[in-house]
């Protein structure tokens, strides 16, 4: 059985260089969960657990039907109610939507069935907040950040300068793709793709 690996199918979306570049991000399906608060807090951790549980449940449902795929990297979009980037606001005011990309053939019906099955087994309340969404960011600027999350502002400044120099403006939420597992990777070696939709 062939296994679909979306990081290879959409290589240009899951690789980036240390200098900003313009790319086009087509619409894609994601299992997603939305929340608010400090990413070091319990709600964020429980939401991440629920999202991964959902993703593997959907994968298993399709694997049994002969369409296996690799569970993709964790991603997240970030925003605050007021104008500006999340980093300029207290962490408890950060809103986020955690995402894991799904193959285009994944349907909402199968996702809902997989979520019900997972809830019966795991009894994770936040599974009831997971849904299948479509994200279409279009024209975007992307850059690779190497190092701990706390040092992202320096990389973001490089991206902000590029956006201004190119005569572009922000057109959507700040997006991060977590290429490294923080449980297994030293902070200095962590790799995160930072993306900003523009127009």
Image: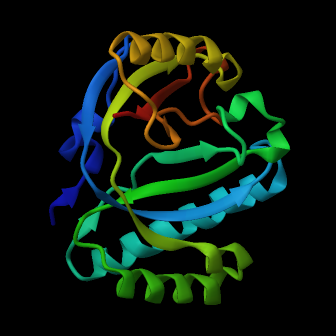
Question: Closer to the camera, 77 or 181?
Answer: 77
Give above or below for 35 relative to 116: above
Asked if 138 appears above or below 170 in the picture, the reply is below
The residue under the point 55% across, 89% down is 116
The spot of residue 87 in percent (x, y) is: 71, 29
User: Which is more toward the observer, 64 or 127?
Assistant: 127
> Residue lying farthest left?
2
Query: In the visual, does 175 lie left or right of 5?
Result: right
Q: Which image quarter is the C terminus in?
A: top left
Residue 97 placed where, x, y %?
Answer: 58, 55
- In this figure, what is the number of numbered marks? 0
Residue drawn at x 43%, y 20% is: 144
Q: Position of residue 106 (x, y in %)?
A: 29, 73
Residue at the (55%, 61%) spot, across then down: 52
Indicate the quadrant containing the N terminus: top left, top right, bottom left or bottom right: bottom left
* Residue 84: x %, y % from top left: 66, 32
In this picture, residue 19 sits left or right of residue 22 = right
Q: In the image shown, does 166 or 149 lie closer to the viewer?
A: 166
Name the image colouring.
rainbow
Quadrant housing residue 51: bottom right
């Amino acid at each position: 059985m062939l296994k679909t690996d979306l990081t290879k199918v959409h290589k240009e979306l899951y690789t980036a260089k240390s200098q900003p570049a313009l790319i086009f991000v087509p619409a894609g399906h994601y299992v997603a969960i939305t929340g608010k608060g400090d990413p070091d807090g319990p709600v964020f951790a429980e939401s991440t657990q629920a999202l991964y549980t959902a993703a593997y449940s959907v994968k298993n449902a399709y694997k049994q039907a002969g369409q296996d795929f690799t569970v993709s990297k964790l991603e997240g979009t970030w925003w605050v109610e007021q104008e500006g980037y999340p980093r300029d606001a207290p962490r408890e005011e950060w809103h986020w939507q955690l995402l894991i990309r799904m193959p285009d053939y994944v349907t909402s019906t199968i996702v809902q069935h997989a979520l019900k099955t997972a809830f019966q087994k795991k009894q994770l309340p936040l599974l009831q907040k997971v849904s299948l969404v479509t994200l279409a960011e279009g024209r975007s600027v992307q850059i690779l950040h190497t190092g701990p999350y706390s040092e992202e502002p320096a990389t973001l400044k490089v991206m902000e300068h590029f956006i201004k120099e190119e005569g572009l403006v922000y057109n959507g939420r700040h997006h991060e793709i977590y290429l490294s597992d923080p449980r297994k990777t030293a902070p200095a070696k962590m790799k995160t793709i930072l993306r900003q939709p523009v127009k």
